């Protein structure tokens, strides 16, 4: 072979001619970058700034952090948060692993039912899970009092069991309920990637089922397990709702921020604690990214999906295991509903709907509930449109590699941002009429958003952006990459192909994203608790306020309403999407 | 072929992905109406070149001139081409008719005109009655035709085909080869097709451009590329070829010393300095099995090593043996250790051909090609 001599090139710079259509597409891609910059990146700057300043805004360096760790009541919280998150993560992933294994690798009956029940906590505010636990294990709880003394009457001796709910026990139980479905979703997806051919090969080579588990099952689940561990850790570390209700005197970072900001109006300390809350989250997030990058496609196109065969003992064990967990979830959620309709717990167990009349209690009442629904709807519609549009422009635009890379990076960040951090950052970014950047003063062009529905919707979209964005990106990646090339050759502008081809093909994913936004906007409290105004109260926040004021029954009633709404929305969505599938997706049907 | 100015000119096109050169100073003229093939193994740059012609990739340097216009800097939507991909990229949520109409509707043609053109295209590719089907309801071959109809509906000046037959099974592929080639000739649209399948290129092309390592190594008609491959790479990639290492022997006639035997070769070898290393190449079908034992030049003894039965003919794997393996007959030459593939008509006399048998084999002078070995 002759060595390839590189010819002398006249490397003229070849800039493409931009057509009007391209200018439009590039302009839109620029807008995507811009909104991510404003929604995600920029608000973090004043947060960091405030954490290094005193109450008057003077720079004090790490003084806030030093003071935090020197204040005995506060310093413990960091360790407490870590401890609670670690134990929760271990338990949630272990339990979810068994549940996912039962769902995907055994032939147990009623899988649909078990799957649905396991997902139930996703449709409840974490506060509601806490309230459910209070009614079971609290001072006057069903279990604590031995079924309200009923057990004693029947058995002739005290059967009450006080588990010491308030404190780490309660927090771990609550977070466990909250994290379990999140881990389960990830593990079920990972388990569904099983290639039946590997199991057949393993069997044909005479491997025992234990060896098959170690050599085939675990490796395919490895990345799912790691992901589940990081996700659970982040959620349990940053959740606010559960420790708010059942934390007692056991302080964690999330409740500390709330107390500093809402209770003491100490924004600088709140910002400092936010940074502390953010740090482990960011570390976990980065680690997860690094690990996932090493994952290669577990499932090739030629893989054969695994179909479990019935085995009597394993199926029975799986059914018992799943029944126990499902029962636990149903009992806690059921307790909320029960508490909502009982007249005076635990003295008068007559059923009543009087707790649903919110006029006598604080928190904003029925108006708050309707505000929440409005907010969830806006979040769903605007969020789905913005998320899908952004994912499309980032994924399918030719050229602009740097801008698209930056936008993709910004899209990943919200995953690592706890809701409380977003809320606090938004206060600092949107509240001031004038931004002070060092000695410079600039009018804040986004101040008009502050205290409006707009900032609530934006906060929600950003808070739940990454998962939605990944859903959209995955759907887009499944489309033939040459659609755009073919369209260009047919001189169809990109927006025509987007509207006529891309959107219809991705409709299921689009609806899924809207649903995800709706439910999460409905149940979230952490991102909005710093941003709502007295004129614009929200249901989830009302639960906090009612619980704070001791109106636990009303809080339970509001929780029940929120759960019913999000579950109802899900059912409506299922029915609608089935209809839609039949009407508009007929091209999927082969003859 | 006319000598009019070429429809498409590629001038000194280079493409780097990072530091890797995908295309290295590629220049090429495509005549109006011809069916041109870009042939080569994967990674040779043929698809990159096609994408540059379409405007889907930007060249690092060089020019693309289509119908006299420099289109190098134009985006795909401003160029004049239709394209069919290996995946077809049919819009799955549109029917056959809607897929074909897609490009016509972009041009804001009147509805009646679109419908008429769709009917015409459906008839052209023989899909009458399938207009309302969705792509998922068609066979691979039918989908391929829809993709072709969609690309042709807009009457492009240039048709680009990116391995359009590769996803089909062998039987359908063979039939569609003929159909596509006939369609191209009937419409007379200038067509460039990318393939790694040399048989496809040989059967369908007007001209073949063979590429290797980002460079063009030969341009010619299928006959030229097959009969007179420019390099051993082309000879090996297009069809089967026997290669025998040798050394040029100086003399009045061109001769090459090959494994102990002296071969008379075409005159081209005479220009090479004596003692230089060469590769002698001969197609298997040019290797003659002698039954009558005539005395000729370039006749050697060979031993049958293996026989492959291929239906219409048999492929013989011959070993050019050492002296002790086959008893020498008259002055026929002896070789050692080299191997040779030849064909034998399955209908011919085969009694004397069996594994282990010794044969006389004739390597005609005019069938030999000599490639100087590069340093």
Image: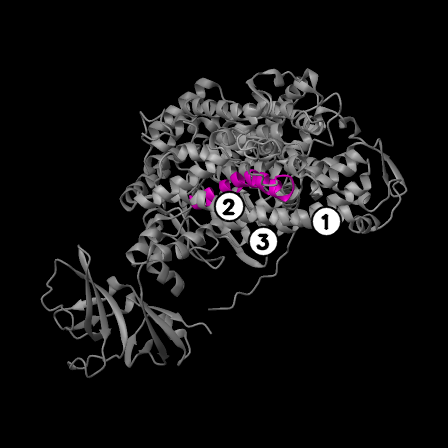
- Chain that bears disc 1: A
Of pointers 1 and 3, the one earlier in the residue sequence = 1
Residue A202 visible in rendering: yes
Which residue range is magenta in the image? A165-192
Q: Report if the CB atoms under discs 2 and 1 are less than 8 Å apart.
A: no
Residue picked out by circle 3: A290
In front here: B33 or A99?
Answer: A99
- Whether A181 is among the magenta residues is yes
Residue picked out by circle 1: A76
Classify residue A261 by image quadrant.
Answer: top right
The lab-note entry on whether marks 2 and 1 share a chain reads: no
At 74% from the left edge and 40% from the top edge, which residue is drawn? Answer: A257
Q: Is residue A397 above or below residue A7?
A: above
Residue picked out by circle 2: B51
In front here: A205 or A154?
Answer: A154
Label 3: state its secondary structure: helix
Label 2: state its secondary structure: helix
């Amino acid at each position: 072979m002759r060595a390839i001599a590189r010819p002398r090139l006249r490397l003229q710079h070849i800039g493409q001619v931009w057509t009007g259509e391209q200018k439009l597409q590039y302009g839109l891609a620029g807008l995507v970058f811009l909104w991510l910059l404003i929604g995600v990146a920029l608000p973090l700057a004043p947060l960091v700034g405030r954490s290094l300043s005193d109450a008057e805004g003077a720079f004090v360096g790490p003084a806030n952090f030093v003071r935090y760790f020197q204040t005995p009541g506060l310093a413990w919280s960091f360790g407490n948060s870590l401890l609670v998150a670690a134990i929760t993560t271990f338990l949630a992933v272990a339990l979810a692993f068994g549940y996912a294994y039962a769902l995907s690798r055994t032939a147990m009956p009623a899988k649909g039912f078990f799957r649905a029940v396991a997902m139930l906590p996703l449709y409840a505010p974490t506060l509601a899970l806490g309230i459910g636990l209070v009614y079971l294990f609290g001072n006057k709880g069903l279990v604590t009092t031995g079924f309200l003394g009923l057990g004693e009457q029947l058995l002739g001796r005290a059967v009450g069991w006080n588990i010491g709910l308030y404190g780490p026990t309660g927090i771990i139980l609550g977070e466990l309920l909250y994290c379990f479905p999140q881990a389960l979703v990830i593990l079920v997806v990972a388990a569904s990637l099983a290639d039946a051919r590997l199991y057949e090969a393993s069997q044909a080579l005479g491997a025992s089922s234990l060896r098959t588990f170690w050599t085939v099952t675990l490796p395919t689940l490895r990345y799912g397990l790691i992901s589940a561990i990081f996700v659970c850790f982040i959620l349990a570390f940053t959740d606010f709702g559960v420790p708010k209700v059942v934390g007692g005197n056991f302080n964690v970072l999330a409740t500390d921020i709330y107390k500093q900001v809402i209770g003491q109006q100490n924004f600088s300390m709140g910002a400092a604690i936010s940074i502390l809350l953010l740090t482990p989250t960011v570390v976990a997030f980065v680690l997860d990214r690094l690990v996932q990058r090493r994952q290669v496609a577990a499932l090739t196109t030629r893989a054969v999906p695994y179909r479990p065969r019935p085995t009597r003992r394993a199926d029975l064990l799986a059914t018992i295991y799943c029944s126990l967990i499902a029962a636990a979830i149903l009992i806690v959620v059921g307790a909320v509903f029960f508490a909502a309709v009982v007249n005076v717990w635990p003295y008068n167990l007559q059923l009543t709907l009087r707790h649903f009349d919110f006029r006598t209690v604080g928190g904003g009442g029925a108006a708050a509930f309707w505000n929440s629904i409005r907010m969830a709807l806006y979040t769903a519609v605007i969020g789905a449109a913005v998320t899908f549009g952004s994912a499309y422009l980032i994924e399918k635009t030719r050229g602009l590699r740097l801008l698209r890379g930056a936008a993709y990076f910004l899209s990943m960040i919200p995953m690592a941002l706890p809701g409380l951090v977003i809320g606090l950052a938004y206060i600092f970014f949107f509240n001031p009429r004038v931004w002070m950047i060092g000695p410079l003063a600039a009018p804040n062009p986004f101040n008009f958003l502050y205290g409006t529905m707009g900032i609530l919707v934006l906060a929600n979209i950003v808070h739940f952006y990454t998962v939605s964005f990944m859903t959209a990106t995955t759907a887009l990646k499944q489309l033939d990459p040459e659609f755009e090339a073919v369209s260009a050759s047919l001189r169809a502008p990109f927006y025509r192909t987007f509207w006529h081809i891309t959107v219809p093909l991705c409709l299921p994913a689009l609806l899924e994203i809207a649903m995800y936004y709706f439910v999460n906007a409905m149940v979230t409290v952490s991102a909005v608790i710093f941003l709502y105004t007295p004129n614009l109260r929200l249901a989830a926040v009302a639960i906090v306020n009612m619980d704070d004021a001791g109106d636990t029954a009303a809080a339970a009633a509001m929780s029940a309403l929120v759960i019913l709404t999000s579950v109802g929305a899900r059912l409506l969505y299922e029915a609608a999407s089935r209809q839609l599938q039949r009407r508009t997706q007929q091209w999927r049907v082969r003859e | 072929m006319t000598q009019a100015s070429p429809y498409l000119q590629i001038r000194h096109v280079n493409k780097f992905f990072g530091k890797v050169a995908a295309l290295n100073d590629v220049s090429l003229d495509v005549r109006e109406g011809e069916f041109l093939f870009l042939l080569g193994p994967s990674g040779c740059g043929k698809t990159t070149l096609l994408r540059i012609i379409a405007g889907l990739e930007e060249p690092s340097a060089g020019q693309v001139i289509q119908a006299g216009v420099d289109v190098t800097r134009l985006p795909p939507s401003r160029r004049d081409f239709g394209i069919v991909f290996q995946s077809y990229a049919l819009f799955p949520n549109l029917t056959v008719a809607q897929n074909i109409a897609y490009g016509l509707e972009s041009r804001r043609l009147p509805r009646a005109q679109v419908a008429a053109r769709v009917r015409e295209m459906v008839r052209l590719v023989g899909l009458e009655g399938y207009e309302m089907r969705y792509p998922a309801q068609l066979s691979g071959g039918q989908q391929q035709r829809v993709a072709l109809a969609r690309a042709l509906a807009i009457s492009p000046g240039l048709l680009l085909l990116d391995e359009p037959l590769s996803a089909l099974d062998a039987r359908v592929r063979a039939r569609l080869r003929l159909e596509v080639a006939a369609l191209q000739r009937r419409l007379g649209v200038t067509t460039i097709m990318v393939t790694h399948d040399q048989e496809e290129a040989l059967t369908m092309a007007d001209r073949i451009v063979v590429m290797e390592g980002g460079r063009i190594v030969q341009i010619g008609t299928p006959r030229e590329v097959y009969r007179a491959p420019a390099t051993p790479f082309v000879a090996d990639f297009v069809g089967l070829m026997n290669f025998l290492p040798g050394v040029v022997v100086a003399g009045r006639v061109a001769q090459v010393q090959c494994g102990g035997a002296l071969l008379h070769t075409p005159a081209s070898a005479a220009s090479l300095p004596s003692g230089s290393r060469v590769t002698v190449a001969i197609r298997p079908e040019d290797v003659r099995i002698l039954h009558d034992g005539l005395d000729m030049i370039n006749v050697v003894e060979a031993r049958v090593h293996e026989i492959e039965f291929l239906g219409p003919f048999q492929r013989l794997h011959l070993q050019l043996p050492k002296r002790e393996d086959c008893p020498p007959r008259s002055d026929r030459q002896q070789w050692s250790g080299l191997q040779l593939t030849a064909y034998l008509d399955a209908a011919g006399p085969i009694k004397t051909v069996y594994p282990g048998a010794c044969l006389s084999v004739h390597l005609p002078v005019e069938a030999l090609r000599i490639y100087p070995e590069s340093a």
